[in-house]
Amino acid sequence: MEKIDILSLSQEEIEEKILDIGEKKFRAKQIYDWLHINKVEDFSKMTNLSAQLREKLDDIFWINSLKIQKRLVSNIDNTVKYLYGLPDGEAVETVLMEYKHGNSLCISTQVGCRMGCRFCASTIAGFVRHLLPSEMLLQVYETERDSGRHVDSIVLMGIGEPLDNYDNVMRFLTLMNSEGDGMSLRHISLSTCGVVPRIYDLAELKTGLTLSISLHAATDERRSEIMPINRKYHLDELMKACRHYFAVTGRRISFEYSLIEGVNDTEQAAQELINLLGGMTCHVNLIPINEIRERDFRKSRSVERFQKRLCDAGINATVRRTLGADISAACGQLRRDGGMNGQPGVSQQKTGGET
């Protein structure tokens, strides 16, 4: 019998399994606390359980784990970038960022990505598999354990398309919002390139999380050139879904717009974006693009002008602060650059000093 990934189970699901093997219901709460409060990695450490029960658990379940393959620490702003090795030999990236309001963690939801956005490093090596809920959760647990910092907010904006791994991501959100960690979903942001049917599904759940749309162009022609998802779900369908999400949840949507020199940073592009978003309750997050060697896209030199144009038109627009510039902290860059060949537990700091 294949063992069950216990870290991906809710407390109620653990209760069902415990009752099935003839144990008392209250044992499930004890087990859940060991996993999500004490964060133990082995059943033998659950010392308030009998040896017999611990053996049963070891026969039925397994406790997932991640290993640090690389750790890069920025000397500029204390950003920490992790390359986590998975049990099957794959690897994903996680980035810990320090803000005045607290520590934010950017996590991955897939190994690779199949969305094919032309400016993104995550998609270059292709899609391998979905991450399990436990593998998303462990990015939080292991980062807190290693850094000694509490994670105050989470962004699902690392490697992968969260809504392409919908069921596992929803289970992860449930676990994060549960009794163990108890993070309010209002402190979690989910970024999608625009998987329209799942936006409607997400709206009906009324989770309270912040939805971010990777927009990057305001016409179908231009967006389809750089984001293949737009060939399946055109902008009119995407914007209809966004308006529905706001109407149902009351949560303002954030639109991410990576500015690419000569591609989407012109005066015309700004006006097209104004036309698209005019009248919506939204926020535009302007992002200086991260240059990658496989693409010839270059950072825009018109970021401030573009921002002013939007603000003058009454659209709330800010420029994302660049963090971890000295450690290539954009998603996909470390994994793509051969980080998977690193040894588990190796700590590296690109700019010197002690971690």
Image (cartoon, grey):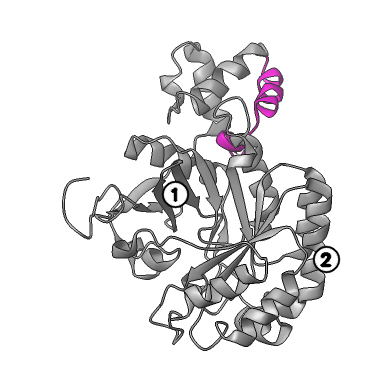
In three-dimensional space, the C-alpha distance between marks 2 and 1, rounded to whole angstroms, equals 41 Å
Query: Label 1, on which residue?
Result: 87
Question: What crowding class fits label 2: few (fewer than 14 Cα within 10 Å), some (14-19), or many (20 or more)?
Answer: few
**In this figure, which residue is indicated by the disc labeled 2?**
240
Q: Where is the N terminus found, in terms of image quarters?
A: top right
Residue 115: quarter of image: bottom right
At x 28%, y 64%, the residue is: 326
Q: Is residue 335 left or right of residue 221?
A: left
Q: Nearer the viewer, residue 122 or 49?
A: 122
Residue 293 is situated, as x and y percent measured from the top left of the image, at 38, 81
Tag 1 secondary structure: loop
Is residue 207 found left or right of 237 in the rendered image?
A: left
- Which one is closest to the eye, mark 2 or mark 1? 2
Q: Which mark is residue 155?
A: none
Question: Residue 50: image x %, image y %?
Answer: 50, 11
Residue 9 higher or lower than 189, as above or below: above
Whether residue 218 appears in this view of the structure is: no
Whether the residues at callouts 2 and 1 have beta carbons within 8 Å, the answer is no
Instruction: Give the magenta part as a residue range.
Output: 1-22
Label 2 secondary element: helix
Q: Earlier in the sequence, mark 2 or mark 1?
A: 1
Q: Quadrant of residue 236?
A: bottom right
What's the residue type where badge 1 is placed? Pro
